[in-house]
Amino acid sequence: MTRQAFLRLAAAALAKTASAAEQPRILDPEAFRHHVDFFNGMAPEDVVNAIPNAQAWEWIKSNAPLFTCPDRDVEQIYFFRWWTYRKHIKQTPEGFIVTEFLKPVSHAGGYNSLSCALGHHIAEGRWLRDQQFLDQDIHFWLRTGESGGLRKNLHQFSGWTAFALYDRYLSDGKRDFVASYLDPLLLDYAAWENERMTGTGLFWQRDVSDGMEESISGGRKVKNIRPSINSYMYGNAKAIAAIATLAGKAQIAREYSEKAARLRELTLKRHWNKESAFFETLLETGESANVREAIGYTPWYFDLPPDRSGYEAAWKQLMDPSGFSAPYGPTTAERRSPKFEITYTGDDCKWNGPNWPFATTITLRALANTLNGYHQSAITRSDYFQSFLGYVKTHHITQDDGRVIPWIDENQNPLTGEWLARAMKIKKKTFYGRGDYYNHSGFCDLAITGLAGLRPRADEVVEVNPLIPADKWDWFCLDRVPYHGRMLAIVWDKTGAKFNKGKGLRIFADGKEIAHARELSRVVGQALPPANSDQSRDR
């Protein structure tokens, strides 16, 4: 049997296993097949991993939550991102991994593995019904390195691995799984302290190792103290404390709670520029870079800033055309800066202004956290909705024949929508297509936790707060979302005629309604009883 034949059989078996136990559903999966048929016909399938295009629809139908809304572009890109994510599930001799590039790149580790977007991969993949892909990917990074430890290239890039694992636990409730990784996560954190902690207690990072190559505040070889890595490490420390609590390790929980508190204090004190009202990079001299960059929103991804503190003023820049707002934005640096560029020369991976989906994903999730957990008036759910639709708009490319098709790549001109790294590759044909279907960001997680509003939490309460203005959509439905061993559905139907489940916002668990509201607003459902006895929940 050929390797490809084996992979196809394995993928088919996985899809069959995932679909074996059908649950009640509101949406008919077949109503969405046409999206995948269209994607499959857009271009030749140059790289085939575990699940080929021919099996893409069956895999999506068996694994991904279904989503529909009045905006056809939003619906199409939602399924497009599951279609592209599936392309990156790769079978290796050491189990499944989720890749970043489809084509081999010279800076990758074994099996074309890269850790830069691992946090995004976990956040996105946690909503799949078959979780063995993520289970094995996590195992690969934390337990298949030297002597069964961390992969050597895990620290090639900054990351929020511990936070991502705890974040996944909030959606699946599997305490034993996340607790079993406490020891490697402790090693991971200690390694970062050894490699990147400065005498100030904050962490430094080169731009390129922060996944950001040439930024407006630094460079590939500059050791700046950046709000990105310090926010990641705060999130990791906070998550380790929570995981240690689940594992019954009270002393470790206290130690890492203290680390998180200290890092939070230092980040607020050192990275916050009072004059610009923004979290900014510190140069090697210790002075502020005095430029607003999208990484200044990273602290809210981890709920680092305290509520009612004034830091929320930074969000006023997101919708400001002199700040980060652009037709294909948000930009990665403020447009008012004299160092902002709209024509790019030299390095094709600059972060001095282009739209990078990696950063947009962090910014939109940080914004959802702000709208859900902070008392503030600097930004609204209408701004979130507009920003999300802008992100949808960026997911396109114009082909040579004039057709506009769904697309995701590395970085984009924020004024024209041209994919920049791809444009550079046209001139350097050796690298053409390197970033095709680039898996360096997230989208479906944003649609689930922000747009549709499912807010994962450690207890068995279901909390939903859609970030959709009341006057925009009369209906939407997110169906068959795996959550703490149950299948959830979130239904908004203004008139009750679209889905025949009643008027208003309604939440279902395994087909049973558990919460409702007349308007689009935050709702909290009744506690979920155990779905089965082997979920190993935290209770």
Image: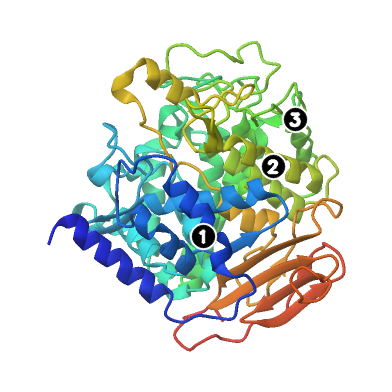
Q: Secondary structure at mark 3?
A: helix
Tag 1: Cα neighbours inside 10 Å, few (<14), some, or many (≥20)?
some
| Image spot of residue 393 (x, y percent) | 64, 37
x 50%, y 43%: residue = 441
| Image spot of residue 486 (x, y percent) | 57, 78
The numbered disc on residue 389 is 2
Residue closest to the eye, 419 or 204: 419
Q: Secondary structure at mark 1?
A: helix
Q: Secondary structure at mark 2?
A: helix
Q: Quadrant of the N terminus?
A: bottom left
Give the number of the mark in front: 2 or 1: 1
Labelled pair 1, 3 in contact (Cβ < 8 Å): no
Residue closest to the eye, 223 or 100: 100
Q: CA distance from mark 2 to mark 3?
A: 18 Å
Q: Amino acid at mark 3?
A: Gln
- For residue 330, above or below residue 446: above
| Image spot of residue 190 (x, y percent) | 38, 49
Q: How many marks?
A: 3
The numbered disc on residue 3 is none
Does the image show residue 457?
A: no
The numbered disc on residue 317 is 3
Q: Quadrant of the C terminus?
A: bottom right
Give the number of the mark in front: 2 or 3: 2
The residue under label 1 is: 33
Q: Earlier in the sequence, mark 2 or mark 3?
A: 3
Q: CA distance from mark 1 to mark 3?
A: 40 Å
